[in-house]
Amino acid sequence: MLKKLFSKKDIEGAVKRLARSIEKDFHGEEILFICLLKGSFMFTSDLVRKIRNPSRVDFMRVSSYGNATKSKGEIAVTKDLEEDIKGENVVIVEDIIDSGITLKSVSDMLKNRHPKNLKICALIDKRARREVNIEGDYVGFTIEDGFVVGYGIDYAEQYRNYPEIYVVEPE
Ligand code: PRP
């Protein structure tokens, strides 16, 4: 059963707030947004539309979960960036931080490519199952626990197209 957690209005408010914070930090400089596929596609698309800085977008895909609800603790890059991020203002856009393994691995990997700045923008920070030390620089919502879907986030590839965010509850 799906229970609504964040409405379209909640999401729009959070995205606007995140965009304003990012703009404030980058003072009109160009930003390269990195959308971590697939979960972040909808969030990235809404976020960049609210950003007034000159912006570019690139995509990266790493795998962690497969179709299960628990992290395997390892990630593999299945689609790398096409842009060279050396000397760039980079913002990683992530839908959800859970164990933190995905973002920690990606940010360590990208730091080695020497961007000028590397920031993390996460729509949802889920605290209960954090396994590694990683924090978002810009966070939309903080939740304790729960399996969330919608607005790009899937359960076994379903629900990504839902415009709102739901928590999956046992029947
Ligand atoms: C999910 C989610 C995050 C990651 C968070 O992605 O979109 O990227 O897991 O989990 P973690 O903090 O425990 O690493 P998933 O690997 O399911 O891929 P998807 O984005 O293609 O759905």
Image (cartoon, rainbow, N blue to C red):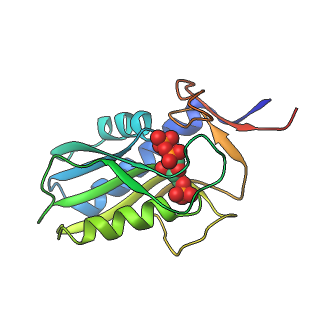
Q: Nearer the viewer, residue 17 or 105?
A: 105
Q: Quadrant of residue 46?
A: top left
Which corner quadrant holds the C terminus?
A: top right
Compared across the picture, whether 162 is left or right of 134 comes to right
Compared across the picture, whether 128 is left or right of 88 comes to right
Compared across the picture, whether 1 is left or right of 100 comes to right
Which corner quadrant holds the N terminus?
A: top right
Q: Nearer the viewer, residue 97 or 131?
A: 131
Residue 166 image point, x, y percent: 68, 35
Please name the residue shown 62% across and 67% down the image: 130
Count of residue discs: 0
Image vertical order of residue 116 relative to residue 163, above or below: below
Residue 100 image point, x, y percent: 53, 64
Extreme residue toward the right, this view: 171
Residue 73 image point, x, y percent: 55, 63
Q: Is residue 34 visible?
A: yes
Q: Is residue 97 visible?
A: no
Please name the residue shown 18% across and 67% down the image: 113
Residue 120 image point, x, y percent: 38, 60
Q: Nearer the viewer, residue 20 or 97?
A: 97
Q: Nearer the viewer, residue 48 or 144?
A: 144
